[in-house]
């Protein structure tokens, strides 16, 4: 079998997947530097497509199209959406869009060549790859993938060697950090990655020395549109303002719900598995996220299109109602079409508060106690994002 360098040199379009996420990062960056058009292929999807495997070992798989003479459109990087609400789609970006997004990440993270970025999420996930792999490389910083159970000991042993540590977080990591203080002596910035945290939870993490911020972005928007750059008491609980003056946000009433519409120069373009555009170029993307603006115009995410307003309230409101119980813990809240509220915790110990939670939410939302369902999540997706339940 040809060497990896030969394969990257001889093939324009590369589909990359791996079981070793740090090797994945290294080879992905090499492919982009060599001018390949790169598709980040999640491990669990590689058997879903009719591709030719041209390199495979225990850590890495490289595929190409079976018909390499077929028309190929011009893009640099393509990523799959997570598939948490629908079938995964592939969005492609040119070099200018990726470069622009990296300039935004440089501004919001403030990392240097003496910084480190750590992620517990697979390299194929847009957040890990753009905010992590490419962002670190663009600034001379170090990037590490670590399993969730490895991150705390890794920080204890390594953080002191860096001027700043950025953690690309998810609920699992946040629950691990929930009882700890930042004793590393290093500035630790946590990008919550959209994890379901209450305003009080963020304040608790900050009081313990973790500079946690919320942001917003999708695979379709090259990972980033909004960020809580301020990090103040006024901005807590929001995803902040748009990170660039060329990005604007509208709330469009769809099914009587205020859905986020993003206008950005960095909207991706859908392609098929053969690297061909299947949608026209657009500067906007209509999301399935429900939101509102605070008094100063910061964006507050309330729920998803599958959620309904109950007594005028959305999942974000329900989470804030029980913030004193949650403290620093994460919980996924859904308002189902049946006017039931479904809460899913990551920490089984939180189930002991089920009756208190039912009392509060049934009162605040004017629903029956039995319509408040409290559960614990047994498993997560590849990206450590949650698969949203179908409405009952």
Image (spheres, grey):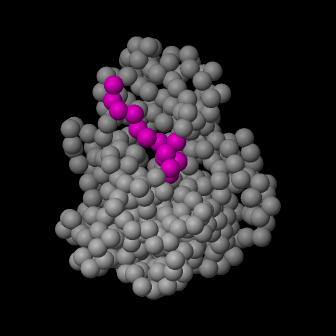
Q: Is residue 269 magenta?
A: no
- Residue 104, given in percent of the width and then of the height, sits at 46, 71
When the figure is inspected, residue 385 is found, relative to residue 217, above or below; the finding is: above
Q: Does residue 191 show up?
A: no
Residue 322 falls left or right of residue 67: right
Front residue of 246/175: it is: 175
- Who's the residue at 55% across and 33% down the image? 378
Q: Residue furthest front?
A: 1
Classified by dominant secondary structure, the portion drawn in magenta counts as loop
- Residue 58, given in percent of the width and then of the height, sits at 60, 63
Residue 189 falls left or right of residue 220: right
- Who's the residue at 35% across and 44% down the image? 85
Front residue of 5/194: it is: 5
> In what quadrant of the picture does the C terminus appear?
top left
Please tell me how many numbered marks the rendered image carries: 0
- Who's the residue at 52% across and 48% down the image? 384
Q: Does residue 366 show up?
A: yes
Q: Is residue 391 magenta?
A: yes
When the figure is inspected, residue 30 is found, relative to residue 43, above or below; the finding is: below
Front residue of 165/3: it is: 3
- Residue 3, given in percent of the width and then of the height, sits at 54, 81
Front residue of 74/171: it is: 74
- Residue 380, given in percent of the width and then of the height, sits at 52, 42
- Magenta-highlighted residues: 380-392
């Amino acid at each position: 079998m040809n060497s990896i360098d030969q394969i990257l040199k001889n093939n324009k379009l590369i589909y990359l997947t791996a079981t070793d996420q740090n090797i994945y990062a290294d080879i992905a960056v090499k492919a982009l530097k060599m001018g390949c058009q790169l598709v980040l292929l999640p491990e669990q999807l590689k058997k879903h497509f009719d591709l030719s495997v041209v390199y495979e070992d225990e850590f890495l798989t490289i595929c190409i199209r079976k018909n390499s003479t077929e028309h190929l459109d011009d893009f640099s990087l393509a990523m799959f959406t997570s598939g948490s609400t629908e079938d995964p789609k592939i969005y492609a970006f040119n070099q200018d869009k990726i470069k622009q997004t990296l300039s935004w990440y440089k501004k919001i993270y403030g990392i240097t060549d003496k910084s480190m970025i750590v992620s517990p999420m697979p390299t194929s996930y847009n957040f890990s790859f753009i905010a992590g792999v490419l962002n670190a490389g663009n600034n001379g910083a170090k990037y590490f993938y670590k399993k969730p159970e490895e991150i705390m000991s890794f920080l204890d042993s390594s953080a002191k060697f860096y001027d700043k540590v950025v953690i690309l977080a998810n609920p699992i990591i946040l629950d691990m950090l929930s009882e700890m203080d930042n004793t590393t002596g290093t500035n630790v910035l946590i990008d919550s990655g959209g994890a379901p945290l209450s305003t009080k939870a963020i304040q608790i993490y900050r009081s313990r020395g973790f500079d946690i911020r919320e942001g917003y972005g999708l695979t379709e928007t090259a990972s980033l549109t909004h960020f809580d750059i301020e990090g103040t008491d006024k901005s807590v609980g929001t995803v902040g303002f748009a990170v660039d003056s060329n990005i604007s946000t509208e709330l469009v009433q769809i099914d009587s719900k205020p859905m986020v519409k993003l206008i950005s120069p960095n909207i991706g373009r859908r392609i098929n598995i053969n690297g061909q555009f299947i949608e026209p170029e657009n500067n906007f993307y209509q999301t399935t996220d429900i939101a509102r603006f605070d008094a100063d115009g910061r964006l507050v995410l309330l729920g998803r299109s599958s959620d309904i307003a109950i007594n005028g309230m959305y999942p974000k409101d329900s989470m804030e109602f029980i913030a004193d119980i949650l403290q620093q813990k994460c919980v996924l809240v859904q308002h189902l079409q049946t006017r039931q509220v479904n809460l899913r915790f990551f920490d089984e110990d939180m189930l002991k508060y089920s009756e208190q939670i039912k009392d509060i939410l049934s009162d605040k939302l004017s629903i029956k106690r039995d319509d408040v369902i409290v559960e614990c999540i047994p498993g997560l997706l590849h990206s450590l994002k949650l698969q949203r339940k179908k409405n009952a």
